């Protein structure tokens, strides 16, 4: 991991053009108030203080640093963000896409707002639809446009289904897991499951089949007791440790949008939240937080980050088709959604205020900004929106400003508003 206390370097082609980005540079560990990130041929080749860059022993780095324009005060250089829970944006949703071009509308919407690595999330649907969408999205993963697929359901609690289709919720089915993993051609990365649903935990259950298929189970949409949640988390932790010991990736279970879609924490009925917080605190799980000022109170975000540490939290959007769009009517899989004042809720003709919250409408940089406004230190908010989710997916090439990694870089102003995005060293059209 790169350290800002001393410049980091990597072997690079000295004949390649080197470009330097200067500003307040955020790495996984610290913020360099006047730093430089040098990129060449799609890779990060140097990260460190501006003064050290201009005096670097490597002439191509020093030359690029001296050419860098002194930025406006507050200019901030971040790693490209990594969103592990995203259903769409720009008017298009992954659960509803029939063609790759439709799905790419959503990918580009978030990419130009700084999310350079994205996990495309599905929602609960019938078997044929899930397999068809997984096959479609696998093509985008093959092409490197997305980093994989997240299936939110269908092994979820009916009582805590949120915006999931009640007609398509089913018991845990290891056979469906294997079929879905096959349709995704190795790109199914995570799947949300409820531990209390029949067929999810235990030998031969869906959770076991997920790990065997290389997929990380994610606890969510559940009214499990603390004991039931602990059982799933312990089972998954043991299986994933076994995979790592056999030379596989070192990964952890995740928790799908902690607090949302699950029984609330109560001192006499702690439910799944207590188990999830404890698992995160001991390093057995990564909890997702939708820090968009809609799904969670800012104090909740700040408190959880303080309690379990940024290294155990992944900030996510849970974005749906309306992200980046105006208020109006949208679809989230088979469910109709109405967006009013930027808040997406299930359309309910009998309730003018709408039903359950149905995903988010923010971009991940908005979530980072909201977390920082809530009192989360910038380095922690960025870490939880880049480094932590990348590691949760087993991705080693993205998620940090560190020499040798892919040149995914986000440049913002002092208010964390996007000014420039690079993906693999190439400018993304804003």
Image (tube, helix red, strand yellow):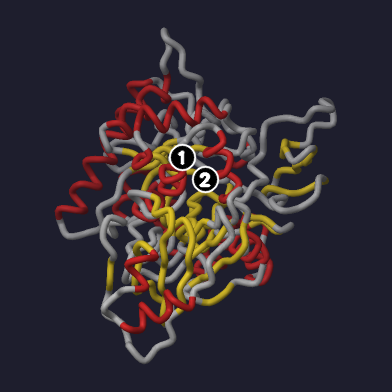
Q: CA distance from mark 2 to mark 1?
A: 6 Å
Nearest to the observer: residue 323 or residue 401: 401
Percent from the top left, x then y, of residue 412? 57, 57
Q: Are marks 2 and 1 in contact (CB under 8 Å)?
A: yes
- Left or right? Give the position of 2 relative to 27: left
- Which residue does the numbered mark 2 point to in the structure image? 316
| Residue lying furthest left | 245
Residue beneath the point at 51% across and 26% down: 300
Up/down of 405 relative to 227, above or below: below
First-in-chain label (2 vs 1): 1
Residue beneath the point at 60% across and 42% down: 168
Nearest to the observer: residue 160 or residue 47: 47
Q: Element type at marker 1?
A: strand
Quadrant of the frame with the C terminus: bottom right
Q: Element type at marker 2?
A: loop
Percent from the top left, x then y, of residue 251? 29, 50
Nearest to the observer: residue 279 or residue 200: 279
- Which residue does the numbered mark 1 point to in the structure image? 288
Percent from the top left, x then y, of residue 82? 47, 56
Quadrant of the frame with the N terminus: bottom left
Q: Is residue 127 visible?
A: no
Q: Tell me where residue 205 sits by quadrant.
A: top left
């Amino acid at each position: 991991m790169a350290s800002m206390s001393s410049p980091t370097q990597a072997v690079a082609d000295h004949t390649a053009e080197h470009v330097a980005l200067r500003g307040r540079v955020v790495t996984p560990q610290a913020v360099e108030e006047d730093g430089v990130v040098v990129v060449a041929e799609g890779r990060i080749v140097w990260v460190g203080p501006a003064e050290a860059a201009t005096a670097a022993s490597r002439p191509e780095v020093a030359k690029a640093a001296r050419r860098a324009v002194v930025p406006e005060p507050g200019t901030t250089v971040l790693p490209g963000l990594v969103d592990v829970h995203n259903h769409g944006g720009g008017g298009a949703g992954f659960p509803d896409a029939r063609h790759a071009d439709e799905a790419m509308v959503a990918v580009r919407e978030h990419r130009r707002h700084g999310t350079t690595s994205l996990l495309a999330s599905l929602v609960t649907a019938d078997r044929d639809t899930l397999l068809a969408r997984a096959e479609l999205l696998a093509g985008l993963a093959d092409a490197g446009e997305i980093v994989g697929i997240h299936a939110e359901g269908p092994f979820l609690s009916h009582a805590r289904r949120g915006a999931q289709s009640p007609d398509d919720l089913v018991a845990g089915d290891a056979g469906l897991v294997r079929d879905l993993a096959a349709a995704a051609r190795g790109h199914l990365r995570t799947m949300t499951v409820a531990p209390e649903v029949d067929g999810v935990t235990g030998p031969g259950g869906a959770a076991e089949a997920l790990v065997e298929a290389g997929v990380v189970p994610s606890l969510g949409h559940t009214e499990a007791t603390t004991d039931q949640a602990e059982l799933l988390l312990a089972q998954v932790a043991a299986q994933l440790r076994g995979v790592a010991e056999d030379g596989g990736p070192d990964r952890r279970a995740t928790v799908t949008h902690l607090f949302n879609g699950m029984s609330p924490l109560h001192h006499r009925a702690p439910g799944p939240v207590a188990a999830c917080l404890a698992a995160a605190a001991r390093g057995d799980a990564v909890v997702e937080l939708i820090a968009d000022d809609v799904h969670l109170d800012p104090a909740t975000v700040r408190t959880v980050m303080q309690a379990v540490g940024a290294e155990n939290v992944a900030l996510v959007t849970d974005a749906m088709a309306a992200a980046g769009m105006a208020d109006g009517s949208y679809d989230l899989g088979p469910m109709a959604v109405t967006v009013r004042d930027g808040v997406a809720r299930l359309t309910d003709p009998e309730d003018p205020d709408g039903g359950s919250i149905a995903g988010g409408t923010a971009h991940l940089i908005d979530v980072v900004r909201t977390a920082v406004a809530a009192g989360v230190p910038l380095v922690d908010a960025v870490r939880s929106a880049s480094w932590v989710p990348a590691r949760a997916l087993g991705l080693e090439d993205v998620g940090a400003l560190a020499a040798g990694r892919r040149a995914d870089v986000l440049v913002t102003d002092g208010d964390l508003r996007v000014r420039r995005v690079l993906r693999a060293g190439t400018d993304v059209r804003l």
